[in-house]
Image (cartoon, grey):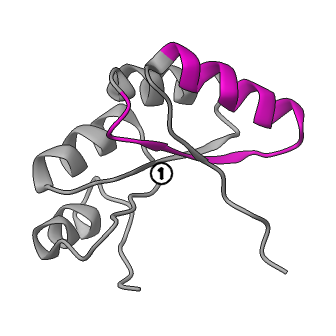
Amino acid sequence: MTPPLPTVRAADADAADALARELLRAGFATFEFTATTPGWEELVASWRREFPRAVVGLGTVTSPEIAERALAAGAAFLASPFQVPDVRPVADGPTGCSSRAG
């Protein structure tokens, strides 16, 4: 059985950070922060630094620019609410995380 993947969406990065920490304490080690959360870029980067064993990705990726910023911040995966063909080359690139349509 595949474990659930929590999507952490909040009003700001501090609230998202607090929620993710609660999920981490509950045993989750993989999170999807969202690009709709203000401050998401630093949030992803700080989680990669502070919790290197956690798998942190970014959802609501709707453009190649967001994908590039997410990967630069350390996102391990990208998710989109719909297919964004221009994101695939970024995800599959040398600093990317590979992509899968679905």
Name the quadrant containing residue 3. Answer: bottom right
Residue at x 68% of width, y 28% of height = 19
Residue 36 in picture, x, y percent from top left: 33, 38
* Vertical arrangement, residue 9 with respect to residue 83, above or below: above
For the view shown, which residue lies furthest in the right direction? 26
Q: Is residue 16 magenta?
A: yes
The C terminus lies in which quarter of the figure?
bottom left
Instruction: Identify the residue shown where x is 35% and y is 32%.
Output: 73
Three-letter residue code for mark 1: Ala
Tell me residue 92's x, y (percent).
26, 70
* Image quadrant where one finds the N terminus: bottom right
Report how many numbered discs are placed on residues in the image.
Answer: 1
Name the residue beneath numbered marker 1. Answer: 76
In the rendered image, residue 93, in percent from the top left (x then y), is placed at 22, 64
On the rendered structure, is 40 left or right of 16?
left
Q: Residue at x 19, y 61 (%)?
A: 90
- Residue situated in front as seen by the camera: 83 or 88: 83
> Does 65 sit left or right of 98 as displayed?
left
Is 29 covered by the magenta stretch?
Answer: yes
Relative to 37, does residue 82 appear above or below in the rendering?
below
95 vs 40, nearest the viewer: 40
* Location of residue 77 (image quadrant): bottom left
Q: What residue is drawn where x is 33% and y is 64%?
A: 80
Above/below status of 16 relative to 66:
above
Magenta-tinted stretch: 14-37
Q: Is residue 98 above or below residue 38?
A: below
Secondary structure beneath dot 1 equals loop
Q: Furthest residue to the bottom?
A: 102
Q: Residues within 10 Å of mark 1 (few under 14, many from 20)?
A: many
The location of residue 57, given as percent across then percent down, is 48, 48
Residue that lies at the very extreme toward the front in this rendered image: 11
